[in-house]
Amino acid sequence: MTPNILEIYSYLRRPHTSKYWVGVVMGKAKQCLNYARHIDSVNRRWSILENFGMVRIDIMPDYNNTYEDLAGDTYDVDVVGNSISGGKRTVLAQKKKFDERCQLGVVGIVGKKRCPCCNGWVEVDSIWGIMSDEWAESEHLIDIKSSVLNSLIKEKDILKGIQYERK
């Protein structure tokens, strides 16, 4: 196991709390190891292609979001007030923290690749509605990088097919 994979694995395997579950969550060893290998592979391939100027990630402000969509029923005291420990006071404290984070802004993560024909940038994948202070740690970042890399592989196969047809 390389030091990079070990670092990612240790991060994934650590016991932590989640905003979606009550209690401590800990990933299963085999799943964490496989995902750590995937993350390392994607990041290594991404950095090579990024150095060649073939791929990039753009972080753009999300002007179309509504904060009601982001919050949903999560901070509705009448809906969840009695279902969590601490009750309404906890929900109101969480809502205050959420509102403070929303003031920092909401962004979209956009994965792009260089078009071989026009040399311009083509958007491959994106996700919107990410809090601006958490996009770098977002699991979606790896998904978008992976999606862009997969599109390059498909494009390479298509270009190979075109090359063979010309011969």
Image (cartoon, helix red, strand yellow):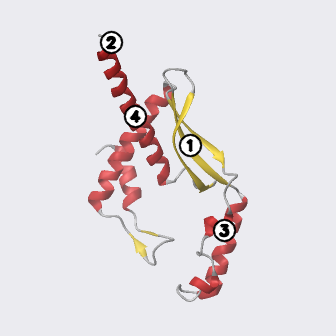
Residue holding disc 3: 68
Cα gap from disc 4 to disc 2, whole angstroms: 30 Å
> Is mark 2 in CB contact (under 8 Å) with mark 3?
no
Residue 28 appears at what percent x and percent y?
30, 64
Point 66% across, 57% down: residue: 65
Q: CA distance from mark 1 to mark 2?
A: 34 Å
In three-dimensional space, the C-alpha distance between marks 3 and 4, rounded to whole angstroms, equals 38 Å
| Mark 3 element type | helix
- The nearer-to-camera label among 4 and 2 is 2
Horizontal side of residue 115 vs 129, given as left or right: left
Q: State the CA–CA distance, disc 2 to disc 3.
A: 55 Å
Q: Earlier in the sequence, mark 4 or mark 2?
A: 4
- Give the amino acid at mark 2: Arg
Estimate the spatial distance between the alpha carbons at disc 1 and disc 3, rounded to whole Å: 23 Å
Secondary structure under badge 1?
A: strand
Q: Earlier in the sequence, mark 1 or mark 4?
A: 4
- Residue linked to disc 2: 166
Type of amino acid under label 3: Glu
The one of 54 and 38 positioned closer to us in this rendering: 54
Q: Which residue, given by chain and number where applicable, does mark 4 sit on?
A: 45
Front position among marks 3 and 4:
3
Q: Is residue 129 above or below residue 15?
A: above
Identify the residue position indicated by label 1 in the image.
110
Residue for point 37% across, 67% down: 26
Q: Is residue 49 left or right of residue 34?
A: right
- The three-letter amino acid code for the residue at tag 4 is Arg
* Mark found first going from the N terminus, 2 or 3: 3
Q: Indicate the quadrant where residue 82 lies.
A: bottom right
